[in-house]
Amino acid sequence: MRSHGDDRPQPQDNAEPQTGGILTTLQAGTAAPRQSTLGSVDDPLGVRSLVEQAIRSAAQCVGLGVSMEGGTVILTGTAASSQDRCRAGLACWCDPMVSAVQNNLRIKPQS
C-alpha cells in the first residue's frame, strides 16, 4: 500500500527478476572459483601468504609468525611499536576469507 506522496517504485508480485550483476551470477552458481598464484599444499588458497605479505608491507615485526585455523589468523613474534602491532592486526583483514584475528604480537621493549 502506498502512502500519500511516496513516489518510489513499489515491488510487484508478478515482477520479472532483475538480470545481471553479481547477485544474479552468484544465485545462478556461475561465479568463477577463487584462484590464487600464492597457493601451496599447506595454504591452498594463498590466504596466509597474502596476509603475511600485507603485514610485512604495513608493519615492522621481528620473528613474524602467521598461521591460520579456519578463517582465524594467528600472529606471533615481536612488533617494533604498539602502532606496528596495531597495523599488523589490521593488515590481516586484507583477504575476505579472514573471519577473525588473534594478535599475539609482543611489543619490543624500549631500550
Image (tube, grey):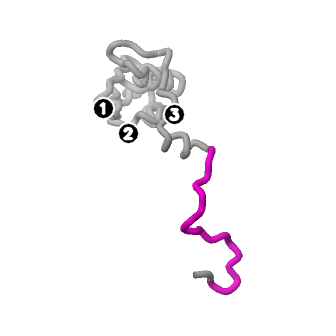
Q: Which residue is mark 3?
A: 31
| Residue 5 vs residue 50, the one in the foreground | 5
Tell me: residue 75, above or below residue 14. Answer: above
Query: x and y percent of residue 21 in the render?
Result: 61, 44
Question: Principal SS element in the magenta part?
Answer: loop
Q: Which disc number belongs to residue 70?
A: 1
**Residue lying at 59% horizontally and 68% vertically, measured from the top left:** 11
Residue type, numbered disc 1: Gly
Say whether residue 74 is visible. Answer: yes
Residue type, numbered disc 2: Ser
The alpha-carbon separation of the residues under discs 2 and 1 comes to 8 Å
Residue 12: in magenta span: yes
Please rate how many residues cluster around mark 2, counting C-alpha atoms within 10 Å: few if below 14, some from 14 to 19, many from 20: few
The span picked out in magenta is: 3-20
Query: x and y percent of residue 95 in the render?
Result: 47, 32
Residue occupying the far left of the picture:
69
Residue 61 falls in image quadrant: top left
